[in-house]
Image (cartoon, rainbow, N blue to C red):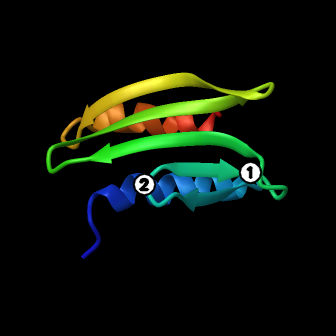
């Protein structure tokens, strides 16, 4: 059985791969979305618990990564999870 966090990380990876980007994980658990030249386009700072997940999404604007969205969503809140996924889809 996969952990519930797999739902989010797998979704992010598949969505970014469809855009021609790659998901990498740092040793401290940060998720970096890079293009083929290893330019970081997005950074997902994800934290998972038994009851919820938190995420800060940073996106490249010029030479900087700027905060685009910060969420804290209970696993039981399907609407907010779907809204989060839609936001990621539209990045």
* Res 7 quadrant in image: bottom left
Nearest the camera: 91 or 39? 39
Mark sitting earlier along the chain (2/1)? 1
Question: In the structure shown, which secondary structural element does the residue marked by tag 1 occupy?
Answer: loop
Residue assigned mark 2: 29
Spatial CA span between label 2 and label 1: 22 Å
Pinpoint residue 21: horizontal percent, then vertical percent: 72, 54
Residue drawn at (43%, 31%) of the image: 83
Pinpoint residue 65: horizontal percent, then vertical percent: 65, 29
Most distant residue in the bottom direction: 1
Most distant residue in the left direction: 51
Residue drawn at (49%, 54%) of the image: 11
Most distant residue in the right direction: 37
Question: In the structure shown, which secondary structural element does the residue marked by tag 2 occupy?
Answer: loop
Residue drawn at (55%, 23%) of the image: 67
Pinpoint residue 10: horizontal percent, then vertical percent: 47, 60
Number of callouts: 2
Nearest the camera: 33 or 30? 30
* Res 41 quadrant in image: top right
Callout 2: 10 Å neighbours few (<14), some, many (20+)?
Answer: few
Q: Is residue 87 above or below residue 76?
A: above
Residue drawn at (46%, 61%) of the image: 27
Would residue 34 be found to the left or right of residue 68 on screen? right
Q: CB under 8 Å between callouts 2 and 1?
A: no
Tell me, for residue 19, which label it has, or none.
1
On-image quarter of the N terminus: bottom left
Pinpoint residue 55: horizontal percent, then vertical percent: 40, 36
């Amino acid at each position: 059985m996969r952990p519930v966090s797999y739902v989010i990380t797998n979704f992010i990876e598949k969505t970014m791969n469809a855009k021609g980007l790659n998901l990498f994980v740092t040793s401290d658990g940060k998720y970096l979305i890079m293009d083929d030249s290893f330019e970081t386009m997005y950074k997902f700072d994800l934290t998972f618990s038994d009851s919820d997940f938190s995420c800060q999404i940073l996106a490249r604007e010029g030479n900087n990564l700027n905060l685009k969205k910060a969420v804290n969503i209970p696993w039981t809140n399907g609407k907010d999870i779907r809204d989060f996924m839609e936001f990621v889809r539209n990045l």
